[in-house]
Amino acid sequence: MKSLQQELDRRRAEHLYRRRRVLGSPQGPLLQVDGVALLSFCSNDYLGLANHPDVIRAMQQGAQHYGAGSGSAHLVSGHSAAHHALEEELASFTGRSRALLYSTGYMANQGVITALLSRGDTIFQDRLNHASLIDGGLLSRAHLKRYPHNDMPALARLLEAHAGGEALVAVDGVFSMDGDLAPLSDMAALCSDHDAWLMVDDAHGLGVLGQGGRGSVDHFGLGQAEVPILMGTLGKAFGTFGAFVAGSEALIETLIQQSRSYIYTTALPPAVAEATRVSLRLVEKASDRREQLQQLIGRFRAGAEQLGLLLMDSETAIQPILAGSAERAVNWSRSLEEKGFLVTAIRPPTVPEGSARLRVTLSASHTLEQVDRLLEALGQLDQGDRA
Ligand SMILES: *Cc1c(COP(=O)(O)O)cnc(C)c1O
């Protein structure tokens, strides 16, 4: 038996040790973290809805009406009118025939891929895809073909070489640790040429990009015909919890019949569905919040470039600053914390070796002044510690 403690010690020595922080406040720019007030730049609450009074009220009223828990799986006795209404509203929002709620995005990705693929089929994945897509592929037992980040000629070659079995291309619409977009129009064309499914995980695009926050797929003007499988999460820009898959009638019925992470788990609390129905309405109307976010992004990028920080090619709310080594990323994060800022270091294996970074995320609830304060603190990082 290997020594667990030795492995933990090795992680610590390599600056890869992860630890949890204890929050004593709601999400928002100002957090109580382990008893200390910090200005946070690392949540995925891009529109500032996680602590919105209307969303909170809807959750309270949902709990009054439905109680605290759903009591059962969707296929047994846990599928409430609240879940059902939210599914219909999500289908209409995304312009898809139907939508199906999952408890988490992790489970949705796993549930879709394992329902559609099995041994002998092939899944094609960008090297920077989210872990939940990778894990779903592994669990399905399909062949895994990974291509370099956003490398369309490489994807085309892999699809051309594919023979026999189903083919599914799965991709993040907005890459979670880099903030850049997948070239979805090119991918849709490739998939159509090669009779492959295209599945887009839009965890970071929904609510933020596209008309009315309809996400990266809408940003590229693509519909259900081009992107037959759309996955979205509700715990990020929507500010609540859960996830959904949207697509054709036949896709959703297939998932209801066969998707194990849908079938064998308790339904979300109906109160969460009620809260999400309200946050969906807020998302649609949130053009001022999206505009504010764009302003903050512009201000941050201009300021960071002036400081000579190594930014990535991102126009979204995810604005990583490349550090390189895990040690440097951790040092940066620590010295920011001493100045009152919470910006987490992202290290391997979440990102490739040698590309550890600070993952700065902006939210519409930040002010320009708060971004300026962050920039000032970034400018004070030890010169020797700068990229
Ligand atoms: C957060 C995230 C998920 C997982 O969603 P959860 O609801 O948090 O389980 C899946 N894919 C991507 C790209 C994500 O960023």
Image (cartoon, helix red, strand yellow):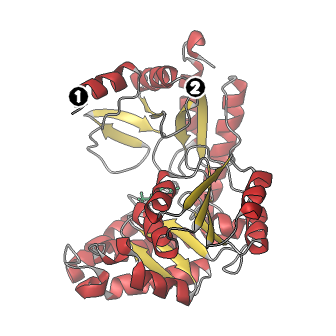
Q: Which mark is residue 3?
A: 1
Q: How busy is the neighbourhood of tag 2: few (under 14 within 10 Å), some, or many (20 plus)?
A: many
Picture residue at 72% right of the left edge, 73% below the top: 222
What residue would you read off at disc 2?
323
SS assignment at label 1: loop
Residue 241 position, x and y percent, is 38, 64
Residue 374 can be seen in this image:
yes
Picture quarter containing residue 183? bottom right
* Ligand 1 under 8 Å from disc 2 Cβ: no
Picture quarter containing residue 174? bottom right
Residue 28 position, x and y percent, is 41, 48
Q: Residue furthest top?
A: 384
Residue 85 position, x and y percent, is 42, 86
Q: Nearer the viewer, residue 244 or 226?
A: 226
Q: Nearer the viewer, residue 47 or 142?
A: 142
Relative to 152, 268 lies left or right: left
Q: Amino acid at mark 2?
A: Ala
Q: CA distance from mark 1 to mark 2?
A: 31 Å
Relative to 21, 183 lies left or right: right
Picture quarter containing residue 103? bottom left
Q: Is residue 92 above or below residue 361?
A: below
